[in-house]
Each structure stands twice: as C-alpha cells, then as structure tokens.
Amino acid sequence: MCLGVPMKIVRIDGDMVVAEVDGVQKEASIMLLGDLVAVDDYVIVHAGFAISRLDPAEAEETLQMMREVFRDEDMA
Amino acid sequence: MNYQDEFRDRALVAIMADNIRKMAARLKKPVNFMEVCGTHTMSIYQYGIRSLLPENVRLVSGPGCPVCVTPVGYVDKAIAAAADPANIVATFGDMLRVPGSQSSLMSARAGGADVRIVYSPLDAVTLAAEHPQRRVVFLGVGFETTAPTIAATILEASRRGLSNYCVLASHKTMPVPMEILTADPDLGLSGYLCPAHVSTVIGGKAYQPLAEKYGIPCVVTGFEPADVMQGIEMLLAQQLAGESKVEIQYRRAVSWEGNPKALAIMARVFVPCDAEWRGLGILPGSGLAIRPELAVFDAEKVLNLPDTPGVEQPGCRCGEVLKGKLSPLDCPLFATVCTPEAPVGACMVSSEGTCAAAFKYGERS
C-alpha cells in the first residue's frame, strides 16, 4: 500500500500537477509538498499525491556508494 | 536518471552481494534483519534477494502491510456501512477481498451494496460532490504514507462544504509496533530495514528513540533491489562495528526531519489513539483518530456502526506471520486452502502481504 512511483512533473496548475512515467501521464496533488517543486522535478507519487521530491545529487551519491567494492583489508 | 532503472541494475546488485558475503564471513553469530514494510517484502520476493544472501544473514518479514494488520472488526464495520443503501463505500482496491467475520466487501458488492474502488482518496471527495443525496464513506487505512493523503481529503471536503463525506479511520503509525517486536526475545532481531515511504513523512529521526533505547541498528531503505542490498550492507557494517544508529540509505527521498507539510496536515486532522493490530493486539498510541472538532467527517461518529469484536477465520495464522514468527510455508493453510483466488487470511489478500508474495514468487517448499 505504501507503493510510490517516481514521476516527472510536466505541468503545474495550482495544487495539482500532471506527472509522467513511461509515457503515462497522471494528475497528482502537491498539497503535501507545497511550492517546493518545479516542472522537470521528479516526485514520489502515492495514491494521487506527491509525497516527496527526489534529490538528483543524493541519488547520484547513493549510486556512487553502491559501486564501491569492499576488500577484506577495508574491513579490518 | 528516472530514479528507477538505475536502482535495478544487476551489476550493482552483484557488487553488493559480494560485499555482503565478505562482511557476513566476519559475523560471530547469525543476524536477523526485519523488513518492516510490505512493499519491502514484495520487492525482496520479486527480486529473489534472499537467494543472494549468505545463510547467516536472515530476513524476517514484519507487520508493515496495512490491510493485513487491519482487524476483522473493522471490515465488519465497513460491510455494515455498505449495507445501508444511503451510503457509497469508497476504498483502495486492497480492502475488497479481506475477510470479515461473515463475509467481505466483495461479497457485499455482489449482493448489491455500492462499493467503489478509488485510486486516490481525492476521487472519493469528488464522488461525494457528484452524489449530494448520498453519503460517501471512505475506508481510511494505511500508515503515515497514506494518512496525510486522507487528512487532506477531510480538509478538502471541509473547504468545499461537503457534509456527505466521512472517513472510517483505522490508520496506524509505525515506530510503536517496532518497539514491541524489538523487545520480543523469540524474534532476536538484530536490525531493521525501516520503511521507505513512511519515512518520507516521519523522517529518519522517528527511529532514533528505538535505536537508542534498544541498541538496535536502523537503516531507512528504499524499495528497489539495489536499495535493499545497500540497506543490508549498512546494517551489517553497523553490526560489525558494534554500532546502533539510525542511517538513511534512501537519501534521495528521505530526510532526517521528514515532510513538515504532510506532518502538519496530519496533525490538523488526527490525534494519536490506541489501535488494534491483527496479531499484535491493542498497542497504545499506535493509531490515528479524527479530531473531535472534525467529528462530522468521522464515520464512527456519524454512522451507527456495530462495535463487536471480529471473529478470525479458523486456522488462519496471519497473526504469527505478521510478527515474523511464522513463515507462510509453515502455515497449514498456505497454498492449500488459502490462495490468492480464495484467501482465508489478509496476508494472502493484499499484494504486499507476506503470504501473497511467497505464493506469487514461488516459495512453495
């Protein structure tokens, strides 16, 4: 039930936005985020509401950390 | 970057599987990590994550499927609301087939009750505006991810002056059951993969008291396979270093403070209350009730609903599955009497129930 989909905002109209994933467009409310979002931002959409804005820099850093290969001596 | 494909990369998962094996070789005894959230459970089964872990790193599924922990008595109330032709019951699809004491909303609908599935709770408000002569009763279930969206509908109905909209609220909040499970010596939990989207709202700080009081590592973890692997890696690192702190793996979406606007909207509409969880019983301060000043939107106050204790289905062991004490395979009903087509218990109904995930992704023996 807590499923949320990362969607890209294509249009903002007051408290509502149109967001897109895999070519599918859907309306979502940004009542829970306020004016923190802009067109081209990615947000997590849950039950028709954007609940969080995705941070590209944090995402890049997370991917960077995932690529780190541990060697035994790193963990000594 | 579309924030999805990058985190499903096999090569990344392979690197982390290798790291995890190296780290696990240094463990003095096996560890049990609980994934609290049903969406994690689903992802772990879907991507075969258990098969990538060494034997001494075990994953235990927790109580984080809202439909699964909703007590039978609540379903009975929803069916009673649907029995009145004056009402339209609006719900997320998951609730439809959950067994009540006697029947389900699905059979009520087959018997003529007006039960409608909505994608967004806002659709239920629209429904109320379109049917001024009838009352729309929305079934408010879900954790802190969903509670603010339902709170928003009550504020929206209030703003639009709709007096024919109400919510049958059974929201639950997360850190409380985790405390009960941490203290359970039978489970012997060594760390938590904390829920991803609940934490976008409540923030990493919500788990700080748990980590401090019980000395248990907590890592807020995303739902994609590479996220889950990194969450496990971070829990192992804490375990090996003898640490117990809250860390956020899912940093692209979760902050330490959470979502202040969602928290404020939730606080305007709800107050904490005691709540009944299937399998765990009544847990103090683990639910959300509609504030008395908004009683006109509270189905419990507006409708005359039965308040009798629900009757669990005979032989159903969802309660133990939800506590992580029983694997679906150890339930005698699993995949015999109880299947997704004809579910006996809620854990087989919801797509993110542990039994449904085990059934769908082939864990049969």
Image (tube, grey):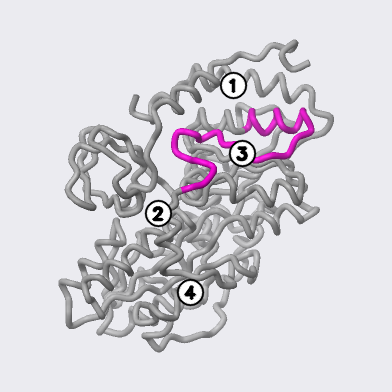
Going by the picture, which residue comes out furthest to the right? Answer: B28
On the image, numbered disc 4 is attached to which residue? B74
- The answer to whether residue B358 shows anywhere in this view is no
Which image quarter is the C terminus of chain B in?
top right
Type of amino acid at the residue the image marks with label 1 = Met
Residue B107, given in percent of the width and then of the height, sits at 36, 72
Which image quarter is the N terminus of chain B in?
top left
Q: Which label is found at residue B261?
A: 2
Q: Residue at x 65, y 19 (%)?
A: B19
Q: Image quadrant of residue B9?
A: top left
Q: Is residue B337 magenta?
A: no
- Please name which of the two marks, 1 or 2, marks the residue nearer to the observer: 2
- Disc 1 or 4, which lies upstream in sequence? 1
Chain label for disc 2: B
Q: Which label is found at residue B16?
A: 1
Q: Which label is found at residue B219?
A: 3
- The answer to whether residue B43 shows anywhere in this view is yes
Q: CA distance from mark 2 to mark 3?
A: 23 Å
Chain label for disc 4: B
Q: CA distance from mark 3 to mark 1?
A: 16 Å
Q: Are marks 3 and 1 on the same chain?
A: yes
Q: Is residue B218 above or below residue B130?
A: above
Type of amino acid at the residue the image marks with label 2 = Lys
Q: Residue at x 47, y 46 (%)?
A: B200
The residue closer to the viewer here, B239 or B358, is B239
Q: Which residues are magenta?
A: B232-258
Chain label for disc 3: B
- Disc 3 or 4, which lies upstream in sequence? 4
Badge 4 local density, few (<14 within 10 Å), some, or many (20+)?
A: many
Q: Secondary structure at mark 3?
A: strand
